[in-house]
Image (cartoon, rainbow, N blue to C red):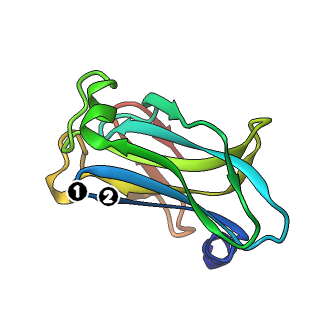
Amino acid sequence: MLHYFAQDFFAAVLPVGFEDDGTLLIYAVSDLSPDLTLRAVVSVHSWSGLDPVCTLRSDLVLVPGGSAVVVLKQEVAALLAGCGRCTRLSCLLTFHLEDGTGVQRGPSNYHFLCSPKDAEGLRKANITVRDRRFKVRAQNQEADYE
C-alpha cells in the first residue's frame, strides 16, 4: 500500500490546497517541461455520506512547465453557502486537477475544514474480524464492505 502513496507523492503534477484568511487557494504544481492547461475540480462532501454534496469547477488556467500557479481562489464561506446545509463542521473538501478534455492529471487531495474529532455526522467505525485469515468486514448505515 505504501507504493500507492509514494506514486501520488512523487507525481509530476500535483494539486496543493490550503486556506489563507478564509480563502481556499488551490495551486497546480507541475514538474513537467511542457505547458499544461488545467482546472481545479472541488467536491464538497458531507462527513455523513459518500457522495459529493456539490462540485465546483474553476476556469482553465495555463500552467507553464516547471511552475506552480493558482488555479482556484474561492472564499470558503461562499463555497459552503452554495452547497446546501454544509458548514465547516459538517463537510470536507476533496479536489483534483483536470485538463480541458476532463482527464484527471495527478492525484486527488483533500482539505479538512475542521478537525475530524469535531466533525458532525462522522460515525464511529464498526469493524470486526471474521476469521483468522484476516477477512475484515466494515459497515455503516449506507454501505456494507467486505
Q: Quadrant of residue 115?
A: bottom left
Q: From the viewer's perspective, is the residue at label 1 or at label 2 nearer? A: 1
56 with respect to 111 (left or right): right
- Left or right of residue 134: residue 24: left
**Front residue of 139 and 34:** 34
Q: Residues within 10 Å of mark 2 (few under 14, many from 20)?
A: some
Q: How many C-alpha atoms fall within 10 Å of the one at disc 1: few (<14), some, or many (≥20)?
A: few
- Residue 141 pos. (x, y %): 33, 32
Above or below: residue 125 compared with residue 6? above
Q: Is residue 115 shown above or below 97?
A: below
**Total numbered circles:** 2
Residue sticking out furthest to the right: 34
**Quarter of the view holding residue 69:** bottom right
Q: Residue 130 has which mark? A: none
Amino acid at pointer 2: Glu
**Quarter that holds the N terminus:** bottom right
The disc at residue 19 is 2
Residue named by callout 1: 21
Which residue lies at the image location 73% right of the left edge and 70% below the top edge?
A: 12
Label 2 near label 1: C-beta < 8 Å? yes
Horizontal and vertical percent for residue 144? 47, 38
Q: Secondary structure at mark 1?
A: loop
> SS for tag 2?
strand
Residue sitting nearer the eye, 86 or 122: 86
Query: Is residue 82 visible in the rendered structure shown here?
Result: yes
Q: Position of residue 29 (x, y in %)?
A: 62, 66
Q: Nearer the viewer, residue 126 or 114?
A: 114
Kind of residue indicated by mark 1: Asp
Residue 34, horizontal then vertical, whole percent: 85, 64
